[in-house]
Image (spheres, rainbow, N blue to C red):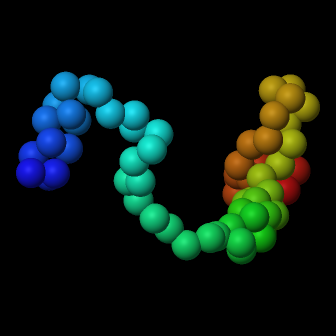
Amino acid sequence: MLTTLTTATESLGIINPMNKVYALTRKLDTMPYFFAIYTLHALGHMRYDPYLNSMMRKNANSADI
């Protein structure tokens, strides 16, 4: 009976979705370190272009590598 009541209230939109747990994941403590290392690695493959005022990918054919 409780499962049918839950299904009915979800269909009608009477529930509070903030109280329902949709997925549980473990704590990701090392993600900031991963993204920092990944960003530093990606910056090694880029150069600053003063004409566009942005970072651009290094080109193997350009003279200012």
Q: Is residue 41 visible?
A: no
Residue located at (77% from left, 70% from top)? 33
> x, y percentage for residue 14?
29, 27
Quarter of the rendering containing residue 38: bottom right
> x, y percentage for residue 43?
80, 57
- Residue in front for this viewpoint, 55 or 12: 12
- Residue in front for this viewpoint, 49 or 11: 11
Residue 4 sits above or below residue 65 on the image: above
> x, y percentage for residue 9?
21, 34
Residue located at (45% from left, 44% from top)? 19
Instruction: Quadrant for the C terminus, please.
Output: bottom right
Left or right, residue 36 beside residue 16? right
Residue 60 sits above or below residue 7 on the image: below
> x, y percentage for residue 18?
47, 39
Residue 2 sits above or below residue 26 on the image: above
Q: Is residue 31 visible?
A: yes
Quarter of the rendering containing residue 34: bottom right
Residue located at (86% from left, 29% from top)? 53
Left or right, residue 27 beside residue 63? left
